[in-house]
Amino acid sequence: MHLLFDLDGTLTDSFPGIRGSINHALVELGRNPVPDQRLRGFVGAPLATIFAALLDSEDPVLVDRAMAVYRAQFDEVGIFENEVFAGIPEALTAFGAAGHTLQVVTARSILSARLVVRHFALERHFVAIHGPEPTERACDKADLVLAALQTTGALPTDAVMVGDRAEDIRAAKAHGVRAVAAGWGYGSRAEILAAQPDYVAATVTDLVSWVQSG
């Protein structure tokens, strides 16, 4: 089986670092920091989308400046305000030992995603990491799912996307890939269920059991 994993909210609990880096960028641009409750709803979205909303502006120069400040802060500080969810390393090891092929599919910029995966010594588990280039201001996750399928030549019916947000589920379904919702992540249960995943894994243990049974 070909297993595709979202990064933020699925493999790692990155909210503290994301929150701090977003608010750092907003303050640098003369704006007020945003409370956690509002920020949680943005985790997993492309940076350009996040800052366009928080700055209430479609000005590409302003949004790009915010993104640059964010990335510098995250790569230096925010990455260390992050941790792998409990059970994930063991699950990835088990999946690899069982012969499954693993890839990362994330809306985080490809350079940042590689940095996070390498920082937590997870790169040995994955044959590829897919994410938008830093210069891309929009990201369609369905395109990244397609890229992952093409990387290994996987049939959609032999692939599974695991992610914590509706966007992950919709991206999988766009290509006929089964979708498993990571219930330990940032997406609300209402959001997840509305997207109609094939399975909701409340815990990492549930995910492992589902994959083993399939």
Image (spheres, rainbow, N blue to C red):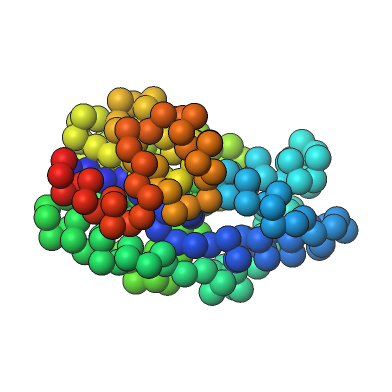
Quarter of the view holding residue 4: top left
Q: Quadrant of the N terminus?
A: top left
Q: Is residue 156 above or below residue 52?
A: above
- Residue lying farthest to the left in this orientation: 98
Would residue 160 appear left or right of 8 to someone viewing this image?
left
Vertical comparison of 76 with 193: above or below: below
How many numbered circles does the render carry? Answer: 0
At horizontal 77% and vertical 55% (from top left) the residue drawn is 34
Answer with the quarter of the image where residue 20 lies.
bottom right
**Left or right: 214, with 52 as reference point:** left
Position in image of residue 105 (x %, y %): 39, 46
| Residue name at image x 85 percent, y 57 percent | 32
Q: Which part of the image, by quadrant, shows the C terminus?
A: top left
Residue 63 location, x and y as percent? 73, 46
Q: Can residue 188 be seen?
A: yes
- Whether residue 105 appears in this view of the structure is no
Image location of residue 117, percent across then percent down: 40, 64
Q: Is residue 74 left or right of residue 129?
A: right
In-image side of 148 versus 96 (left or right): right
Residue found at x 41% / y 29%: 196
What is the quadrant of residue 145 in the picture? top left
Q: Position of residue 22 (x, y in %)?
A: 69, 58
Residue depicted at 75% across the width and 57% down the height: 35
Q: Is residue 193 above or below residue 34?
A: above
Q: Look at the picture and state if 8 lies above or below 72.
A: above
